[in-house]
Image (cartoon, rainbow, N blue to C red):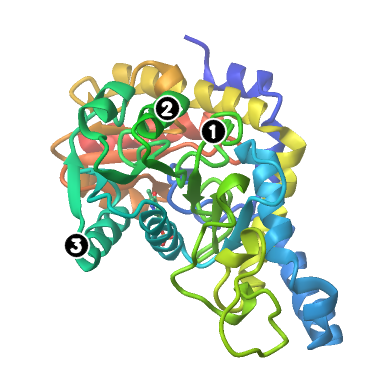
Amino acid sequence: MSTAADLDAADPLASYAREFCPGDDLVAYLDGNSLGRPLARTVDSMRHLVEREWGDRLIRGWDELWLARAEELGDRIGAACLGAAAGQTVVGDSTTVMIYKLIRASIAMRPGRSELVILGDEFPTDRFIVEKIADDNGLAVRWVSAPHDGGITPEIAAEHVSERTAAALFSGVAYRSAWWADMPAVTGVVQSHGALMIWDCSHAVGSVPLELDAWGVDMAVGCSYKYLNGGPGAPAWAYVAARYQEQVVNPIPGWLGAREPFAMTQGYEPAMGIRRLVSGTPPIVGMVPLADMLSLIERAGIAAIREKSVELTSFAIELIDELIPDARLASPRDAARRGSHITVDHPNSARAVQTLWGDGVIPDFRHPSGVRIGLSPLSTTFAEVERGVRSLAAALA
Ligand SMILES: *Cc1c(COP(=O)(O)O)cnc(C)c1O
């Protein structure tokens, strides 16, 4: 087994970790998949926004800078992380609201269909929205189960998706197990029944390479405060394949998604293209940290990020096997099917995580007995993983 020092010395991305704010009591940050760390340069970027863009340009800032920003940032996320050509991705709202919009749009595109398909242990917000929309529209929810250390597979999808399905919502990388689905194969199964495939890429974006265009995905959505380090409450992003954009009806029609926002016309006419997914004023302030992190991802490249991610999670699993033999891994051992976090089950998890947080070692507790360790490739070092897992072993004992 290589040592943390060997691995850090050989890491081509090692210098990136020094670009993040150090944190005053931080020993090991193992929760980069819940809230990514801030970049030091973002202090200057925020100052620039306040003093120069907002302070100097005032209302002129909208015409000069901000109106196009939701689409410009969307295109950058698309190019750097999603395998999406320009004009299909937009930034705004929270993931929750974006999921709502996409599911409402997709059931309107599949009239007469009676079911929505989702995993029973999907992230809460996804389940809540699917249940509510189904309830409001007289549809049924088809709850699907998957193994504790897994997630959606083409076989499981094939058992549940049918001619009754309007849309299926699955996670590209599962929030608890980190199961990275065979996204092109699952997409194929869902579409073979004429249903629409919506991927929640909250834990996938910025950690695994996505090829939404090449895989023929219909729609996708994701969070920006995890591996995109957009900060607390950073706006989400949504992707709608170009072929569907003229059919998508935004269930929250607002002035900035209208064809002529400043014409103040009677009646809503949607914008052509992805901007029709915008409702109200986009959160420009909240986009600043996200833009900074995208610069790093563009520089490093998602392929190198993925390579380091695999090494980080593999190293963590080796350490856990050695130091915490009574923990049960609840994530795939096969690195090819694993995102950038791992979950281990242990009866002492809740108490251990509480102690560790006080000591500057920060993993995540997942009810009822999981410790989730998120390893954000650009900000996490191998030495940090070793410090974190050693502390975890002591706290669990
Ligand atoms: C983090 C996460 C979200 C976040 O939703 P917000 O509304 O942006 O807070 C949604 N879905 C999944 C699967 C997530 O992991």
Identified at 49% across, 53% down, the residue is 223
**Is residue 241 in view from this perspective?**
no
* Label 2 close to label 1 by CB (< 8 Å): yes
* Label 2 close to label 3 by CB (< 8 Å): no
The residue wearing badge 3 is 138
Q: Residues within 10 Å of mark 2 (few under 14, many from 20)?
A: some
Q: Is 95 left, or right, of 303 in this rendering?
A: left
**Which mark's residue is nearer the viewer, 3 or 1?**
3
Q: Is residue 118 above or below residue 55?
A: above
Identified at 41% across, 22% down, the residue is 337
The residue wearing badge 2 is 188
Identified at 45% across, 18% down, the residue is 336
Identified at 53% across, 39% down, the residue is 376
State the residue lying farthest toward the top.
1
> Between marks 2 and 3, how big is the CA–CA gap?
26 Å
State the SS at label 1: loop
- Which mark sits nearer the N-terminus, 2 or 1? 2
